[in-house]
Image (cartoon, helix red, strand yellow):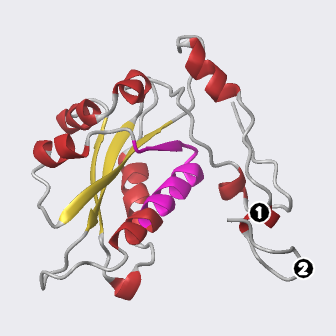
Amino acid sequence: MEKTADTSVPLHPLLAKRWSPRALNPAATIDDAQFAALFEAARWAPSWGNTQPARFIAARRGESTFDRIHGTLSRGNKGWAGDAAALAIGVAQSVNSDGEPMPYGEYGLALAAQNLVLQAVAEGLHAHQMAGFDRDAARVAFSVPNDFEPMVAIAIGDVGNLDDMPERLVEKELRPRVRKPLTDLVFTESWGTPRF
């Protein structure tokens, strides 16, 4: 199943083909090179002052860390994310080595996560980012220090079959992808006033 974005102007295929499926193939695997490429892409994301605040806890299905990450997911996400070939938790550094707040740490993690997601598309995979996980449970399960914040969980895999999914999730998977028009998001003289 493909859900290529219906864009107002042509976009690079990596962007147009990126979407977040819940129906994942439980037989799909990610090989060593693909797995490394996901996080190498994240490593090369831009960050404020090259502070590189992003960290990832990651594992492939069959590894004990995968099960521990899966255990932190919300009930709704646990139901489908166990079919992922890999799971990760993105963690942002919030305090620098001098004990001062880390500027733009969350933004740096977001950029790294987006690089990871787009590399997944380049590898013929999909990634689904989730806010639905227990940050405190992740902190405890992986001994995350207080100067780092678990921010996002990510399921990575190949698109699977809708047959075994609950009807409410099938409906979500089949919904068309939509976005607000550019004129609602970007202010420029030719497009009109901003709409906040």
Question: Could you tell whether 6 is left or right of 132 in the image?
Answer: right
Residue bounds of the magenta highlight: 112-131
Tell which of 137 and 41 is nearer to you: 137
Q: Relative to 26, is 138 on the left or the right?
A: left
Q: Quadrant of residue 39?
A: bottom left
Question: Which residue in the protein does label 2 denote?
Answer: 190
Look at label 2 and name its amino acid. Answer: Ser
Mark 2, secondary structure of its residue: loop
Question: Which quarter of the picture shows residue 82?
Answer: top left
Residue type of the residue flagged with mark 1: Asp
Of helix, strand and loop, which one carries label 1? helix
Percent x, y for residue 75?
Answer: 35, 24
| Residue occupying the point 26% across, 40% down | 134
Is 128 colored magenta in this rendering? yes
Instruction: Please name whichever residue, 29 or 46, is drawn nearer the observer in this view of the structure.
Output: 46
- When the figure is inspected, residue 119 is found, relative to residue 95, above or below; the finding is above
Residue under the point 73% across and 66% down: 195
Report the quarter where the C terminus lies. Answer: bottom right
Q: Residues within 10 Å of mark 2 (few under 14, many from 20)?
A: few
Front one among 33 and 69: 69
Task: Name the residue at 40% across, 79% down.
Answer: 47
Query: What residue would you read off at disc 1?
Result: 184
Above or below residue 162? Residue 120 is below
